[in-house]
Image (cartoon, grey):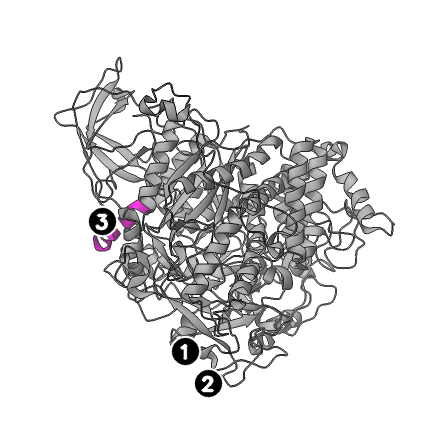
Amino acid sequence: WAPGRKKIAHATSTSLLVRYPEPHRISNSIQLHLSDSHSFHTQHTYMLLLAGCGRWQSSSSPLIILLTLVALAAPSVSLTGYQTIGKRLPSPQRTSLKMGLLKVGVPMKWEKSKENNNYIRQAGVRQFIATYNRVKDLKGDELLWGDEIEYGVFILDEQNKKIRLSLRAKEIMDKLNEKEDAHAHRTEGCNWVPEYGAWMVEATPKRPYTGFATDLLRVERNMRLRRRRLLTELRDDEVAPTFSTFPLLGALGDDGSVPPTKVGGSVTLSDYIGDGIINPHPRFATLSANIRQRRGEKVNIRVPLFRDTNTPEYKGFDIQPKVDGCCGSNTLQLWRYGKGDVSRDKYGNDRVVVGCSTSAGEFNESNGGPETLQKWLVDVKCDGCRGLFYRSAPNVIVPDADWPRNGDVVVGAEIPNIPGWIRLQNGYYLPMASDDGKIKFLHEVSKRTHASNEEKARLGSSTPLFRGSIAADTNKVADGLALQTLLEEKLSLGSSAVADVEVEAEERTMSSGTTSEVLMTPRSSGDTENVRAAIHMDAMAFGMGCCCLQITFQAKDLDESRFIYDQLAVMAPIMMALTASTPLLKGRIADTDCRWGIISECVDDRTPAERGLSGQSEPDDDLAGKGQRRIYKPRYDSISTYIYQGAYNADDEVKVANSTKNGMKNRVLNMYNDLPVPIDEESYKLLRDSGIDPGLSQHIAHLFIRDPLVVFEGAVEEIDDEMQTEHFESIQSTNWQSVRWKPPPPRNDPNDPHIGWRVEFRSMEMQLTDFENSAFTVFIVLLTRVILTFDLNLYIPLSRVDANMQRAHSRNASHQGKFFFRRHMAPLAEGDDGYGVKYTSMFARVAKDDVDDEAEASLSRVSSKADIDANTIDENGVSDQRKKTPFAPGRYEENSYEEMTMKEIMTGKGDYFPGLIPLVFAYLDYINCDPITLKRVTEYLDFIEKRATGELVTPATWIRNFVRSHADYKDDSVVTDEIAYDLMVACKEIGEGARHEAELLGDLKINPISTAGAYDQYLTSNKTHNQSEELL
């Protein structure tokens, strides 16, 4: 057996023979891994029990073992391990020697499974540390990348104009994989893997794309090949368009699939769907059941319902508004996904409270705005006291780090399970008061107060961050009256570091629904909340049944992977809005465009206490944090912390009070982290004690506030923490974040392929054609090259990334909305930070009237190799500019970013922001891209630009328009059988090139796709027998 994340053999009968090359490494049990959905990137563990065998000491000959498979749910399984995307291992050698029995692993029920939670979490951290220490110094990996596309298979009833789920995905997938094996000689091929739904199948390229420009053309060819090959296994009445979600899922009762499945079941307890539509692999049902049981109730998904003129759910509202929503046409209506418990208690499952993007209350946390860190004034009132020492952990003083003085404002969050302490944005800790509680050290102030630490202000740039600087010495700090005034939140210091303080009481009085439009409230309510009718769903299938487009990149080393992870996290909501394609849910038109929040709520396993509902759940020692730790986001959400640390050199030491203070290596340097990051304190300490830097330790410790959701019999303490990563992956792979950072998997055999540090980009929605999916895939790949080559900086505070995620869900957000984005992506030539210092950018335009000529002239300098090479590069190829990005000017206050339209983000704004698409063109010019590749990539970029400017609509807008213009539509927000049937037929035809929609594609024509040419035809010499005469 050669472990590798790749299918190496199918077990279509009861026995399988494999060869293990290193018997001296085997004790009396061997762990094998069986293939699972790549969307979760985990493996099921099976134990091989070797009867009557001890240890083999000799390594002179391979061990041959007969594996007898005990079928559990699926009739066939596949042995897998680790491998780079799409690369096949050779078939195993076969023999007839019978020496063992493969005992199929069985997932534990939740009550038994959770007893292992604490061990698995601790072992998972140990496994990460072992992996990190083993591969942290890997350098020079080439760019390898690949995409994932998910398909849904549906059955058409042409006579009755109906469409239903076809639960044949496994059968289709098995046949497709058999054909792939038979056509392994082809350079281009496909991998087919299961997905959550029994009607879903996922496909990836057989081999990864490489770092050559010509491979950009492989993407569309391979996507078209996947569609063509899938068509070969569909029946005449089946279709498989690249469509985000089945529009009638949960609206058809027992008649929603073929074969029919009865609503409900012990796994989901759903009122709308049956357990029978879940993939039969035991992992998926176990995930569904354990999420529900850990949460303590069914998942609760409530999406705003689109309001049309005859929508019955809105008849109880006071005022009949336009279809623009409760915020009006000049702003975006915000769905606060994952934060609706309070409104559910108040209004039930049929209503949901929303916000508005231009209201002052968009960031009001009590109304569902992004949670942000609290700010605290340091004021230690005792004789001779000048401030506080940092602590690396509660009660562990760090004497060599610059410490906050009286008058400084620090940023952090209270630690719920360690009363009296706050954990700061920089990873250090501070006590809130003296041990006896008599002297208060930290005083809560407005979140709009600017943090002010002299050491922070000097990091990365000599440009002043504020109008003035606050002195480090207490003799120069504002007097006691000024401090007291700050505590009362009435201070406007003018030239001091603490500027533009706003009264928090004013923030509290601003309702998130205050707009110029009249408020939408139910007739029975006198409140002023923005209440909308809701589409209610109650099972994991509603979210995990959505299809999407994902991309995974291999970075050249650890440093690059962490940097690209952060930059792509900023792009996640932007690209989600630009690719929006999910406006239909459960037979209704939604008032949102994207799937993300639906999936987020469908896997929300947080207990009531973790969701912020006090007194509704008892502590449970088997759960992480005993199920009581406040967790601000579901497992499926945007990231909560950046992970790139940048670099701290000896030259950056800060001199305070005539002594050199270091300590920077012990702190989180990325100052754009402004969200509370709950962490597992024990895991964090173990990671730091093992030499892992604070930024990465924080990330891993944050992942491990979650519990494992699927645990297999015989695969807990049996796992080797030094050589395997199953427990780490069981936590990592069920933190479904907008971007996923993926360490190299272990190589258990010298023949295993090498895999490096990877980043997975996960937010984009499914498009109807392979051209569209290819365009966005290629754009993201090129954008990563642009960022690395031109040393660009996309950082904005994570609270604004979260705000963008909420905005991206809004109807027509791509065309009508605005998003927070960094103003100056390039290095600053002269300060600015928004305080009146003249700014000179590498993108500054020349004085010409023609905008296109200006852009071209300014970008010519960007693509100059001499300019790029002039930047100081270290021995690892990392520039000084990249090292400084985590603490660049304007890092965590409002001055580094502004609101931009999608058009401005993609095509440019003013003379300081060139736009992402022009930068990609500059990069293509810089590398001298070949004409053939450039021609197709230009078509991709032109298409994306038209989408961004609104000349072309998103799939979500097109789908909503299709439904509302259908003859069977009654202006009631209902998607009937006939509408759904015609829509899916239209989407099939668009994807296969049989139908052109100018609203979606403009003048672009899709070349027709059929089954012809899906596979090679062998030049057979078999006799034709009686057909000879006919053929001749």
Count neighbours of disc 1 (C-alpha within 10 A) and say few if under 14, some if 14 to 19, many if 20 or more.
Answer: some
In whole angstroms, how far apart are the C-alphas of marks 2 and 3? 46 Å
Would you name the residue on which mark 2 appears? Answer: 525
Give percent across and percent down for residue 145: 52, 36
Which quadrant holds the C terminus? top left
In front of the other: 420 or 151: 151
Mark 2: which secondary structure?
loop
Count neighbours of disc 2 (C-alpha within 10 A) and say few if under 14, some if 14 to 19, many if 20 or more.
Answer: few
Would you name the residue on which mark 1 appears? Answer: 347
Q: Tell me the tag on residue 108.
A: 3
In front of the other: 1000 or 885: 1000
Q: Tell me the tag on residue 842.
A: none
Give percent across and percent down for residue 151: 43, 48
**Image quadrant assignment for residue 78:** top left
Residue 625 in the magenta stretch? The answer is no
Give percent across and percent down for residue 388: 54, 57
| Nearest to viewer (mark 2 / mark 3) | 2
Magenta-tinted stretch: 108-125
**Image quadrant assignment for residue 627:** bottom left
Q: Residue furthest left?
A: 52
**Image quadrant assignment for residue 726:** top left
Sequence-earlier tag: 3 or 1: 3
Q: Are marks 1 and 2 in contact (CB under 8 Å)?
A: yes
Give percent across and percent down for residue 143: 55, 32
Report the amino acid beneath label 3: Met
Q: Can residue 680 be seen in this view?
A: yes
In front of the other: 208 or 833: 208
Mark 1: which secondary structure?
helix
Sequence-earlier tag: 2 or 3: 3
